[in-house]
Each structure stands twice: as structure tokens, then as C-alpha cells.
């Protein structure tokens, strides 16, 4: 991944941080096709979308073609879902246009993730508590392991075990911000497989929104009846996840870039030195703890 200003490619076991703690997983980051369009003078966050690094066709014949087909299908599903969401909230689908670049091409990310059984003396943080960015995540749990957990309104962590033939759909922090909190972002984490078990695999697809939209300027409006639904949830405990709090204030592309910088400081150091210095003033973190 360190070769890619778009944060695509392979991250080795233990290379990634969530809430400043090392995640016990390794992964490949890919995405739907996109040609980078950044030019000098443009905001730096426009460097984030670009061509994925694909494995050598000789080493993994057919992978790229198959994965791109999968991404195209899930992308379509993700927009069908957005239409259902608009229907449920009783708003016109067109009110969501500002988030989708007025119909222009977006790039959506996806990963292939492996959670090995961690060494005896290490933590069981497969990935720590976090929100996904963007609007919706379509998470395929690709092996039968438990480990994925989501946090309920009382702040308790609940298992979300795999159900064959289904996706887990997470609400992203951008959607929460755009809907005034009506769609509550899914706080989630993954516990590593138990000692003596086998590695767990997952394939999340992250539905993105326009890089230039500042959500605070485009917050959706709802009828009083719909807004009242929020109150009917009763008292809500603050979730453990804290990331992507900047969606109301900054362009969404900048929020996404900050998230990447915090998770992958080595990539940031090479390609985004100013942001790296801002978030890691003491230099590259030792494995385990950072900001
Ligand atoms: O592996 C999983 O089930 C969840 C992965 C995840 O939450 C993420 O990568 O954002
Ligand atoms: Fe996630």
C-alpha cells in the first residue's frame, strides 16, 4: 500500500491502527474503476481516488475481472438500497443528488480482509470500534466465524454472526450526518478468532459519496413525523466509536483522507507529509499506539 497515494494494495498484519491501537488483520484494498483527476492547485483530498493496484494476472488469473464484476453488482445494489431509504424517510430520491456528484462518476472502495488467530501474547482487536465513512457498507462475512460485533443503543456489544447468503449493512457516518442522526451510524468492531480456531475472512464494500460535498451544507430535511422517530428511541448511550466526526464541517473527501491518514501512517508519511506531521507530530508510531 505504501506505493499508492490512493491507499490501495496490501497492508501486512499489524500495519493498521483503529482508535490508535493496532488491528490484528491483513488486507488488500481495491475499488471500482477511477482515473485520478488531481492537478496542482486542487485540494489534496482529490488525490485519494485513483487506480487500484491489482494482483499480477499470472499469479491470480481472473481475480481482477471477477472482483470488478462483484463490485459493479454490489454498487448497483447499494443504490437500490438508497432508493428504499429515501422511500422510508418520505423524501424524494433526487434530494440525495448533491451527495452523488449530481450523477457523475464516483469511486467506491472494497477490501479483502483476513483475521488470523493472533499470537498468544497479543490483543484480540481484529479491528477496533469504529464507524465506516460514506453512506452504506455491504459487508460479506466470507467465512463462518463469529467475531463481528455491533453496538446497540444501550452501548452493549452484540454479536452479528454470519448468515449464509446475506450481507451485513452498516450505516456510515456520512449518512448519519446527512440525515440529522435519523439513520444512526453503526458502531462496530471485530474480535480475533479464538486460539485453536482458523482465520476469519470478510469482504466489505463501502458506498462513497461526492468528495466535494460538505454535508453540513446539504443536510436533508424531513417531516416532523419522521423526525419524531428519533425521540422514540429513548435515551442513547454514546458509542465507543469516535471517528469521522468531521463530516459536518469539512468536504467529505477531506474527512475520508484524514481517516486514511490515521489508519495508515506509513502511507501518509510518504504521500501526504503535511497531514502526516499534523496527526503524527512525533513521527511514525511504534506498533500499537498512535494518536
Ligand atoms: O471484517 C469485518 O467483518 C468488518 C470489517 C470492517 O468493519 C471494516 O473494515 O471497516
Ligand atoms: Fe467497518
Image: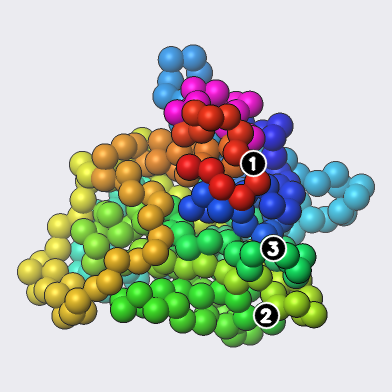
Examine the rendered structure and indicate whether residue 54 appears above or below residue 125.
above
Residue 168 vs residue 14: left or right?
Answer: left
Q: Which mark is residue 286?
A: 1
Examine the rendered structure and indicate whether residue 104 appears above or below residue 276.
below
- Give coordinates of residue 32: x percent, y percent: 60, 48
- Give coordinates of residue 99: x percent, y percent: 33, 47
Q: Dot 2: what SS? A: loop
Residue 100 vs residue 14: left or right?
Answer: left
The response on whether ligand 1 sits within 8 Å of label 1 is no
Measure the alpha-carbon separation of dots 1 and 3.
Answer: 15 Å
Looking at the rendering, the stretch of residues picked out in magenta corresponds to 266-278
Q: Dot 1: what SS? A: loop
| Residue bearing the label numbered 2 | 145
- Give coordinates of residue 65: x percent, y percent: 75, 53
In this view, the residue in front, 126 or 54, is 126
Residue 273 colored magenta? yes
Amino acid at each position: 500500500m505504501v506505493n499508492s497515494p490512493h491507499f490501495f494494495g496490501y497492508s501486512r498484519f499489524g500495519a493498521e491502527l483503529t482508535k490508535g491501537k493496532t488491528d490484528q488483520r491483513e488486507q488488500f484494498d481495491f475499488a471500482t474503476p477511477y482515473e485520478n483527476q488531481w492537478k496542482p492547485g486542487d485540494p489534496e483530498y482529490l488525490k485519494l481516488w485513483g487506480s487500484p493496484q491489482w494482483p499480477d494476472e499470472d499469479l491470480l488469473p481472473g481475480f481482477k475481472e471477477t472482483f470488478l464484476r462483484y463490485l459493479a453488482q454490489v454498487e448497483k445494489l447499494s443504490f437500490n438500497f438508497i432508493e428504499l431509504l429515501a422511500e422510508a424517510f418520505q423524501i424524494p430520491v433526487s434530494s440525495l443528488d448533491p451527495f452523488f456528484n449530481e450523477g457523475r462518476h464516483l469511486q467506491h472502495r472494497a477490501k479483502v480482509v483476513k483475521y488470523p488467530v493472533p499470537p498468544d501474547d497479543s490483543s484480540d482487536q481484529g479491528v477496533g470500534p469504529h464507524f465506516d465513512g460514506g453512506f452504506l457498507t455491504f459487508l460479506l462475512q466470507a467465512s463462518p466465524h463469529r467475531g463481528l460485533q455491533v453496538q446497540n443503543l444501550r452501548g452493549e456489544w452484540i454479536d452479528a454472526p454470519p448468515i449464509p447468503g446475506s450481507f451485513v449493512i452498516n450505516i456510515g457516518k456520512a449518512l448519519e450526518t446527512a440525515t440529522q442522526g435519523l439513520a444512526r451510524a453503526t458502531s462496530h468492531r471485530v474480535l480475533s478468532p479464538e486460539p485453536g480456531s482458523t482465520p476469519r475472512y470478510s469482504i466489505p464494500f463501502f458506498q462513497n459519496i461526492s468528495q466535494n460535498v460538505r454535508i453540513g451544507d446539504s443536510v436533508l430535511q424531513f417531516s416532523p413525523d419522521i423526525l419524531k422517530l428519533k425521540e422514540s428511541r429513548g435515551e442513547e448511550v454514546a458509542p465507543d466509536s469516535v471517528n469521522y466526526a468531521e463530516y459536518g464541517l469539512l468536504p467529505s473527501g477531506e474527512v475520508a483522507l484524514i481517516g486514511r491518514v490515521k489508519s495508515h501512517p506509513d502511507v501518509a508519511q510518504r504521500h501526504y507529509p503535511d497531514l502526516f506531521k499534523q496527526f503524527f507530530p512525533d513521527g511514525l508510531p511504534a506498533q500499537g499506539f498512535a494518536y
